[in-house]
Amino acid sequence: MQIDYKLKDKFDFGLFIPCFLLIGIGLLAIYSSTLNNPSAGSNFEKQLIWAAAGIVIFFIIYSLPTNTFRYAAIPMYIFSLLLLIAVIVIGRQVSGAKSWFDIGPFGFQPSETAKIGTILGLSAFLSRRNANIDSFLDIFLAIFIGFIPIALILLEPDMGTAIVFGGMILALIFWKGISLFSLFVVLSPVFVAVSALFGVYYFIGALVLIAITLFIFKKNVFFSGSIFALNLGAGFLVDYAYSILSPHQQRRIQSFLDPMADPLGAGYNAIQAKVAIGSGGFLGKGFLAGNQTQLQYIPEQWTDFIYCVVGEEFGFIGSVIVIGLFLFLFLRLLKIASAAKDEFLSLVLVGILSVYFIHFVVNIGMTIGILPVIGIPLPFVSYGGSSLLVNLFMLGIAANIYRTRKSYA
């Protein structure tokens, strides 16, 4: 009994078990979705290998001295930037993005390791002794640190991963303790820019909301006018930003705004994914019995659209179980981050949580048609070796922090 208590005190089963179950569900879905696809027949075996390697990495990271992450923060950040530069120069192009390295029969995405490097590097910056997140200089520097990998990822181009980085940066700044007004200054241009995509009336409505909010904050006229001008510029610049996207990214945004505008092209995957999930009913059609899955209506559904396989074959119950496992994991990470007394470690945990959470929201959102299709996998579930390894690496960091939490109280 004493041994069990010591094990629970050092090893957080609340982190490991949900992820282990999600990996298992993912393997079932990958096996089913690739069963009748000769070109992807080896994906299940590859994912098994990646899963086994990832679990080994998890325990290695779990066993390291916790201060290792603090010492490695800046070197890992710099190394991740070098990898992002290298992949732009000599990487392999897949689906219009030059974002892969080949390692024998396997592929590897440097943008995945950049998640770890950026989380550690930005957490180290924000937790330094003289940090003041309400200083606009510190806010600018924090955003700049995060923007360097975003800029390199956009050069590939990979808009989906860049969005993940953007959300992670905002989460870390918020957790550091940014004031409500400073957070408003950071987020409002994004809100206006997104509104402008939907049309001029949405753009005007967003500007009215910004003006009302500035009035409520009661800052001086010159400062408020500068913030309003920044938001106005963000709205006008969205057309330019849209124009530099690759054609397939533009079509994805258009199909999100109106999926039926191109039902056999950009809107096809989103429509078929909703059909698959809806046809699953309450209990699902059964393992290996999904029509959409087995007849390959959705191309490469073992990656970004893996959730529609779960919805069709395991139904509402299976879909809710997946969501429940993720929510349990998120709450567990948030609890550990809230209890951590060391600011650097707390920020690292929030960075990890934000990456998982953004992937979760965007992937399921695009599968059920409430968000645009931007090519983001579902953590632990979707097929992908580099994604799975990095997710288990980050989970190992979280478990490591839990193991030594009393030493940093």
Image (spheres, helix red, strand yellow):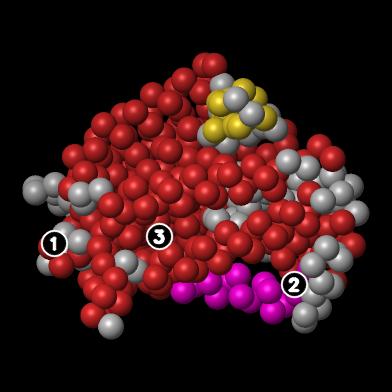
At mark 3, the secondary structure is helix
Decide: is 120 above or below 310.
above
Mark identifier at residue 314: 2
The one of 173 and 15 positioned closer to us in this rendering: 15
Residue type at numbered disc 2: Phe
Q: Which residue appears at 56% of the width and 26% of the height?
A: 103
Disc 3 packing (10 Å; few <14; some 14–19; many ≥20): many
Cβ atoms at labels 2 and 1 below 8 Å apart: no
- x and y percent of residue 397 in the render? 32, 53
Q: Which residue appears at 61% of the width and 49% of the height?
A: 48
Residue type at numbered disc 1: Tyr
> What are the residue bounds of the magenta stretch?
312-328
Residue furthest left as drawn: 130
- x and y percent of residue 382 in the render? 63, 52
The image quadrant that residue 307 belongs to is bottom right
Residue at image mark 3? 353
Mark identifier at residue 408: 1
Type of secondary structure dominating the magenta stretch: helix
Distance between mark 2 and mark 1 Cα atoms: 43 Å
The one of 27 and 79 positioned closer to us in this rendering: 27
